[in-house]
Amino acid sequence: MTDVKYKRIILKLSGEALAGNQGIGINPPEIKKVAAEIKEVYKLGVEIAIVVGGGNMWRGESGAQMGMERSQADYIGMLATVMNALALQDNLESIGVPTRVQTSIEMRQIAEPYIRRKAIRHLEKGRIVIFAAGTGSPYFSTDTTAALRASEINADVILMAKNGVDGIYSADPQKDEHAVKFDKLTHLDIINKGLNVMDTTASSLSMDNDIPLVVFNMNKSGNIKRVVEGEAIGTTVKG
Ligand code: UDP
């Protein structure tokens, strides 16, 4: 393996990352770009597990705000993540990267059920594992899924790829010209300052299990590789 900072990573891709400019749905050229970026990291010999979101199609909270029963709305969200996972799998395999999709809700015709030991075995054998259907439980997010799976598989880090934002800011840099970027933070800082990075469940799980997080801009080509190789970009959250 090439000299890298992180040997086993969880890459958290929000649904948005697969949607392109329009922000909704699945955009094949965009997924192609993402897959190519991932392949560059894969070629370094890094073990990669991916947690995909579903916000490009559906968010349970929005459904609930429109009068749906929350759990039911959340299940729709989890199913959205499976669609994204299959699209990503298709693109990675088409460029020669072996993958397995594991879902937290069983759907054996299209993916394996989530089995922790099997996921680890896949990683050891050089397959990328894509975790879909979140935690399998409503009221959670795919950020929490990333923190949970990272803890379970002993990942070295969660890499949170953001669309157009190059790290964590004190306020939304697109709305507030006084927003400042943080280079380093703790998980507790995120909770205490109420920073809009991940939900508090995800932050506290990452804090309790000592999982570092790097938040960086996905739109700049080569950035996932840069983070894995230890370049100080984005914001690192530790402790
Ligand atoms: N979801 C859920 N439980 C989980 C993970 C996700 O109920 O463990 C649902 C929830 O409704 C959420 C949707 O799936 O809004 C899509 O996930 P998320 O919002 O985390 O996607 P992202 O913002 O990363 O695209």
Image (tube, rainbow, N blue to C red):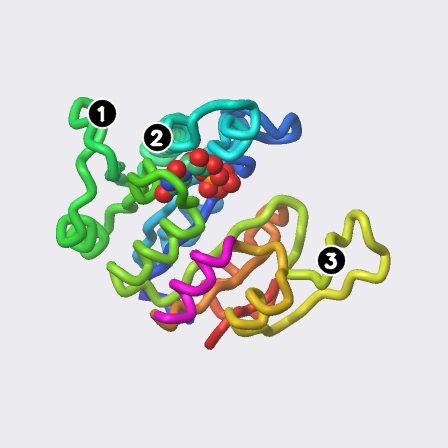
Label 1 – label 3 distance at C-alpha:
41 Å
Query: Is residue 84 depicted above or below 220 in this figure?
Result: above
Label 1 – label 2 distance at C-alpha:
9 Å
Which amino acid lies under the numbered mark 1 shown in the image of this protein? Ile
Q: Which residue is mark 3?
A: 171
Which amino acid lies under the numbered mark 3 shown in the image of this protein? Ala
Eye-nearest disc, 3 or 2: 3
Query: Is residue 222 depicted above or below 60 in this figure?
Result: below
Q: Position of residue 221 (x, y in %)?
A: 59, 48
Q: Which residue is mark 2?
A: 82
Badges 1 and 2: C-beta atoms under 8 Å apart? Answer: yes
Tell me the quarter of the picture where residue 191 sits: bottom right
Query: Could you say whether the residue bearing mark 3 is in a helix, strand or loop?
Result: loop
Q: Which residue is mark 1?
A: 110
Per the rendered image, the range of residues in magenta is 199-208
Name the one closer to the observer, 69 or 3: 69
Query: Could you say whether the residue bearing mark 2 is in a helix, strand or loop?
Result: helix
Task: Kindly tell me whether residue 34 is visible in this rendering.
Answer: no
Q: Circle 2: is it few (<14), some (14-19), or many (20+) Cα within 10 Å?
A: many
User: Which residue is outermost to the right?
Assistant: 177
98 lies left or right of 220: left
Give the residue drawn at x 59%, y 69%: 192
Which tag, 3 or 2, sits closer to the chain's start?
A: 2
Label 3 – label 2 distance at C-alpha:
32 Å
Which tag, 1 or 2, sits closer to the chain's start?
A: 2
